[in-house]
Amino acid sequence: MNKTLLSKFRVFLRGEDGAVTVDWVVLTAAIVSLGMLVGVVIWSKTGTAAGNIATFIGERSINTSSF
């Protein structure tokens, strides 16, 4: 009985099925991290642009006396 358990353990150690799962986890984490980095860059740039637009619009006046 001990010999079969040892042989099954050796087969388990030599198997590569779990390695594919680890590869997918690492690739998925890299893609998610890259997406978050791009999101932060875009968020900061659009926030600055929105502030500039709000300032530009706020400085304008509307002339209603011509009607």
Image: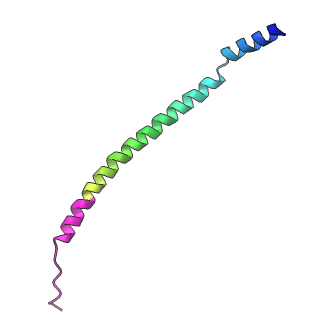
Q: Is residue 27 above or below residue 5?
A: below
Q: Is residue 27 above or below residue 53?
A: above
In the image, taking residue 11 as reference, residue 57 lies left or right, namely: left
**Residue lying at 47% horizontally and 40% vertically, measured from the top left:** 32
Image quadrant holding the C terminus, namely bottom left
- Residue 7 x %, y %: 76, 10
Q: Residue furthest bottom?
A: 67
Nearer the observer, 17 or 4: 4
Q: Residue furthest right?
A: 1
**Residue lying at 35% horizontally and 46% vertically, measured from the top left:** 40
- Residue 16 x %, y %: 64, 20
Q: Which residues are magenta?
A: 50-66
The quadrant holding residue 48 is bottom left
Count of marks overlaid on the render: 0
Q: Residue furthest front?
A: 2
* Residue 53 lies in the magenta stretch: yes
In the image, taking residue 15 as reference, residue 31 lies left or right, namely: left
**Residue lying at 81% horizontally and 9% vertically, measured from the top left:** 2
Q: Is residue 15 above or below residue 28?
A: above
Q: Is residue 65 above or below residue 45?
A: below
Give the colour scheme shown: rainbow
* Residue 57 lies in the magenta stretch: yes
- Residue 55 x %, y %: 20, 65
The quadrant holding residue 47 is bottom left
- Residue 57 x %, y %: 21, 70
In the image, taking residue 15 as reference, residue 59 lies left or right, namely: left
Image quadrant holding the N terminus, namely top right
**Residue lying at 28% horizontally and 51% vertically, measured from the top left:** 45
In the image, taking residue 67 as reference, residue 43 lies left or right, namely: right
